[in-house]
Amino acid sequence: MALVEIKDLWVTFKSNGKDVPAVKGVSFNIEKGETLALVGESGSGKSVTALSILQLLPYPLAKHPKGSIKVNGMEVVGTPQKDMRKIRGNHVSMIFQEPMTSLNPLHTIEKQINETLLVHKGMSQSQAAARVRELLELVGLDEIDERLGAYPHQLSGGQRQRVMIAMALANEPDLLIADEPTTALDVTIQAQILELLLDLQKRLGMAILLITHDLGIVRKMAKDVCVMTDGEIVEANSAKELFRNPRHEYTRMLLEAEPKGLPVRKNDALPEVMSCQNLKVYFPIKKGLLKRTVDYVRAVDDISLTVKQGHTVGIVGESGSGKSTLGLALLRLISSEGGILFDGKSIQHTSWKALRPLRAQMQVVFQDPYSSLSPRLSIAQIIEEGVIVHEGRGNRLERRDRISDILREVGISPDAQDRYPHEFSGGQRQRVAIARALILKPKFIVLDEPTSALDMSVQAQIVDLLRDLQNRHNLTYLFISHDLKVVRAMADSVIVMRNGKIVEQGHSAQIFDNPQTDYTKALMKAAFDLQTAAAGVVNS
C-alpha cells in the first residue's frame, strides 16, 4: 500500500456563481520514503492538489466533486476536522513557499515550534523546550540560544525556512509536502536547504512531495515526476526516464525554458548615467532605556560604481548583502553619505523639490508586482499616475493612447487597461510594472529582483523583454538579483556584494568564467550546480 493514494481527484472553486475546475481528474501515488515532484507553472494546480491532501482548501468555496485521497489507507476527502487534526502534523506536514508570511510575526520562534508539540504531542513545557532545541539542531540553525527568543523578521530567509522545516518535522511525519521551498532564497541558501531535506529524508525515512517549477531541483531531489498544466497531469514517469525522453509538448517546453543568451558587448567609452563614490548607508543600533546608539548596521559600506549609458550592471549577493539598499540610495529614496552623480550632475545634496523633475528619469521596478501595484487602481490608473504627477493631467484621450502604446510595447493588449492587478498572472503584472516605469521615458531603471517570483518560462520572457526594450530605447539598468542565470543573460558587468561591501567586480564574462574570490566561487558553484543539473535534464 502506498503512503498516499490519489485517484481521479477534482477540485472546483466557486466563482460568479459557477463551479470552476482547478484540478481535473488527477491520480498519483506517493511511496513511503520516496520523493515525488509535482512540476508546472503558476496556476497549474500543484498547490491546490497538495493542500487537498491536508484538506486545507477554503471550504465551502472549494469542493471535491469527485475523487479520493487516502493517507495510510484512510480516506481524507470529507473527513471531519477533528479527525483531520490527527493526520495533520502527525502523518503529513507542509512547508510553504514564503516563510515570512507563514510564520506568526507576533510570536517568538520558540513559541511557534512549541505550539505544535503542545497541541499534537501533549508535552509539558520543559519537554517541549528540550524538543525545540533538538529540532533546531536537526535543521542546522546556528546560535540557537539567540534564535529561540527571536521573531521571524529578525531572521534571514534561509533561517526562517529552517524554522519552518523544524515545525513541520516536530511530529515526525510520514510525508513532508515542500511547496516551492527554495524559490525566494539565495543560491547558496537554496543549496543548503536542498541538502538538508535530502539528509533529513535519509535519517527519518520520510516521503517528500516536492512542488516546484525548477527542473534543476527536480533532477537533484526526485525519484518520480508528475507534470501538471491547467489542472491536469499531462505526463508522469520516473525522473530519469521523463528527463531522458519527455513525451508531452508542455514537458519539453518546461525543459527548455530558462533565460538564454548573453548581452551584446557595448562600447565602454559611452557617457556615465549613474555613479557613486564612497557611498555609505548606516542604520543605527539603539539599546538601553534611553535608546543610545551603540553601533551601526553597515548596509552599504564605502561603495563606488559607475553605470554607463545603455549598459546593465548586475548586483549579486545573498540576502542582507546590501543590494537593494544600494539601489534605493542611488535613487535618493533613503539617506546616504558619499557622492552620487546622475547624468553628470551631483544629486546627493539636491533638495527634494529640486530632485522631483529628475524622478521621471530615474525609475524602479520591484520584486513582487502584486504588492507594488495598488489593488484599488486599474492598470490604466497605475500607469498614468506617474504621467499625471510629472506632466500634469493634460488630455485624457492622449493619455489613453500613450497607455495603449506602452502596453503593446511590453506585450499586453491595450484592451486590458481597465482591468485590475488581481486579474493578471505574475508575469503580466511584472509587465505592467515595467510599463509604469517606461511610460516616463527614463534614462536609468533599477530592476530589483524583477524575475525572482516568476516561473522559469516567464522569467525567460521578461529577460527577453527587458533586453529588447533596452536596445530600442537605449535604457540603462542596475539589475539586482540572486539568480545568476538571469544576471548572466542581462548584465554587461557584475558587482558581487557581501555584508555591504564589494568583494569582486568586473566584466560579466570575467566574473562568471574566472571568479577570483572564494565567496564569488562559492556563489557560482551553488548556482551552476543546479544549472548543470537542469542542463543535464535537457541534454540527456
Image (cartoon, rainbow, N blue to C red):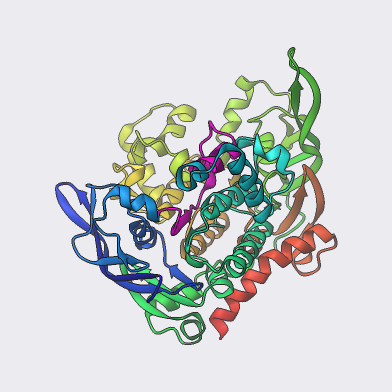
Query: Where residue 266 sits: x, y (%)?
Result: 70, 61
460 horizontally vs 329: left or right: left
Residue 57 shows in the view: no
Question: Quick check: 352 above or below 14?
Answer: above
Q: Residue at point 33% right, 69% down?
A: 73
Q: Is residue 106 magenta?
A: yes
Between residues 331 and 524, which one lies in front from this camera angle? 524
Q: Position of residue 254 (x, y in %)?
A: 46, 72
What residue range appears in magenta?
88-115
Between 16 and 511, the one lying in front of the other is: 16
Q: Is residue 405 visible?
A: yes
Residue at the extreme top of the image, as rendered: 290
| Percent x, y of residue 162 | 61, 51
Give the x, y percent position of residue 109. 60, 39
Instruction: Confirm whether the magenta stretch covers residue 64.
Output: no
User: Residue 57 or 468: which is nearer the viewer?
Assistant: 57
On screen, 314 above or below 368?
A: below
Q: Residue at x 78, y 59 (%)?
A: 520
Give the quarter of the figure containing the C terminus. bottom right
Identify the image quadrant of residue 139: bottom right
At a point 64% along the width and 75% down the height, the residue shown is 532
Q: Nearer the viewer, residue 255 or 88?
A: 88
Q: Which quarter of the figure is the N terminus placed in?
A: bottom left
